[in-house]
Image (cartoon, rainbow, N blue to C red):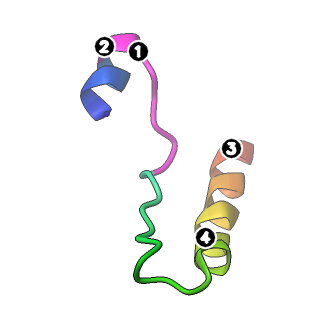
Amino acid sequence: MRELFGELGVREVQDMLRIDASESVTPETDAEPWLAQLIVALKG
């Protein structure tokens, strides 16, 4: 994925979130800290 971003000139603002749904009972809750960091990164 990063190679494609590089070819397209896309700049990542944060690492991709990876949640294994088979290991997490509440993926939505697990994603909340990542989402909060993404909001800060986009505002920054």
Tell me the distance, in whole angstroms, between the alpha carbons under discs 4 and 1. 27 Å
Residue 11 falls inside the magenta stretch:
yes
> In the image, what residue type sits under mark 3?
Leu
Q: Is residue 22 left or right of residue 39?
A: left
Magenta span main SS: loop
Q: Which circle's residue, 4 or 2, is located before the other in the chain?
A: 2
Question: Could you say where residue 34 lies in the image, as x and y percent from the top left?
Answer: 58, 66
Q: Position of residue 17 (x, y in %)?
A: 47, 59
Q: Amino acid at mark 1?
A: Gly
The residue wearing badge 1 is 9
Where are the magenta residues, as a range?
A: 7-14
Q: Which residue is mark 4?
A: 31
**Looking at this view, is 25 or 7 the one in front?**
25
The residue carrying mark 2 is 7
The correct choice, above or below, for 22 with respect to 18 in the image is below
Nearer to us of marks 4 and 2 is 4
Is disc 1 in contact with disc 2, using a CB cutoff of under 8 Å? yes
Residue 12 in the image: state x and y as whole percent.
46, 37
Residue at the extreme left of the image, as rendered = 3
Q: Nearer the viewer, residue 41 or 30?
A: 30
Q: Is residue 43 left or right of residue 5?
A: right
Q: Alpha carbon of mark 1 to alpha carbon of mark 3: how far?
A: 17 Å
Marked residue nearer the N-terminal end (1 or 3): 1
Mark closest to the chain's N terminus, 4 or 3: 4
